[in-house]
Amino acid sequence: MRKAAGDKSADGFLAALRSTTDALKMTPEERRRRRVAMPNFWNRQAENTLDRATAMMPKMLYERLDEIGLDFAIVYPTAGLRLPRIKDDETRRAVIRGYNIVSAEYFQGLEDRLTPAAIIPMHHPEEAIAELEFVTKQLGSKVGMFGSGMSRQIAATAANDPESQRFTVSYDVLAIDSPYDYDPVWKKCVELGIAPTFHSSASGQGLRNSPTNFVYNHIGHFAAAGHAVAKAVFLGGVTRRFPELRFAFLEGGVGWGCQLFGDLIEHWERRGAQALERMKPEKLDRQYAAADRQPHRARRFRAVQDHQEAGLDRPLCDPVLLWLRGRRPDERDGVRQGQPVRRPAQRDLQLRYRPFRRDRFPRPAPASP
């Protein structure tokens, strides 16, 4: 990489890898104090030397493809997974350019059965388009591994030291709520015949940030990263604007995809424009709902009225119900203003989450003639 793209490329690559060894050198107490995730260790095959060498040497992998049972293999980087998230723009571009050049050279002469995935940085649309042009036209790349989940500093935070800035970030999923418009990137992918593929990590973020347990951080993190981008690509309309594009997400299994598919259908049935028409508050017949002749509906409706009088801004259709039993108006004002509620032996404030069950409010038996 130093020969291919200069010192900045090689030094930046080594610095990116050093984050793992730096974290492993910390004591558990230091990682806990700084909330640094426990990283991977002993993660390479050591007992089966042949397989270890096969994973590292393209020509050996090429020779063993028939034995493994593969006709064609797209090879994704392990050491390169973190490169799209290098924060410094100049360093990131130099490292990725050098990596792509060296990776393409490794696989020269093996193109009929092996191809390496070129890394495509996505901090800015311009750099992604530039690298796509370079790897396809200069290196002959057929596949791109696109960056995602890059941390963006939250503008409202005032932290100035690097340690605090690690926690005052949002994560860019490219297609929704991003500071940049990535449609030019998707358009370029269509033009070049490149399918955007993702192999991003969610380890060390949010609920996967244990300073003591790597397995806790590792389980599900690729699926979580893929889920976030796939959901954004769909809800952000990318698949609608570019129906010819195919997206791929690696090393997370397929369970999350099935769950996302079901969730999107369910939310369309509940949150689609046609469904929301049925949920407009003004369509509720309040007089009918509060009628004494139907006590099972009246009880539920009066609970919702109490909920509104308490000043809570949840919609009528929300399953979270606030039951205020016998509270005076001044006490309800206190609830609205966020004051604590006394809890006597028989609680007069209950916050419960449950779906509405019709069997809790059975229809009254028809009156006898």
Image (cartoon, rainbow, N blue to C red):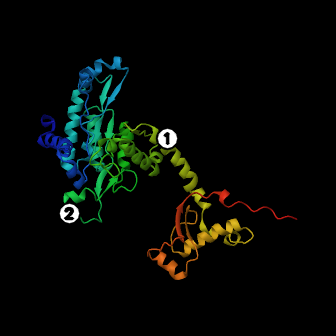
| Image coordinates for residue 256, horizontal then vertical, percent | 45, 42
Residue 284 appearing in the image: no
Give the left or right position of residue 301, taking residue 253 as reference. right
Quarter of the image that includes the C terminus: bottom right
Residue at numbered disc 2: 160
Depth check: 290 or 266 in front? 290
Q: Is residue 369 placed above or below 226 in the rendered structure?
A: below
Q: Is residue 1 left or right of residue 345?
A: left
User: Crowdedness of circle 2 by 10 Å Cα count: few (<14), some, many (20+)?
Assistant: few
Q: Residue at x 70, y 60 (%)?
A: 362
The amino acid type found where label 2 is placed reads Asn
Residue of label 1: 258
Q: Position of residue 330 (x, y in %)?
A: 51, 82
Q: Is residue 303 visible?
A: yes
Query: Which corner quadrant of the image does residue 5 belong to?
Result: top left
Q: CA distance from mark 2 to mark 1?
A: 42 Å
Under tag 1, what secondary structure?
Answer: helix
As drawn, 155 above or below 98: below
Image mark for residue 125: none
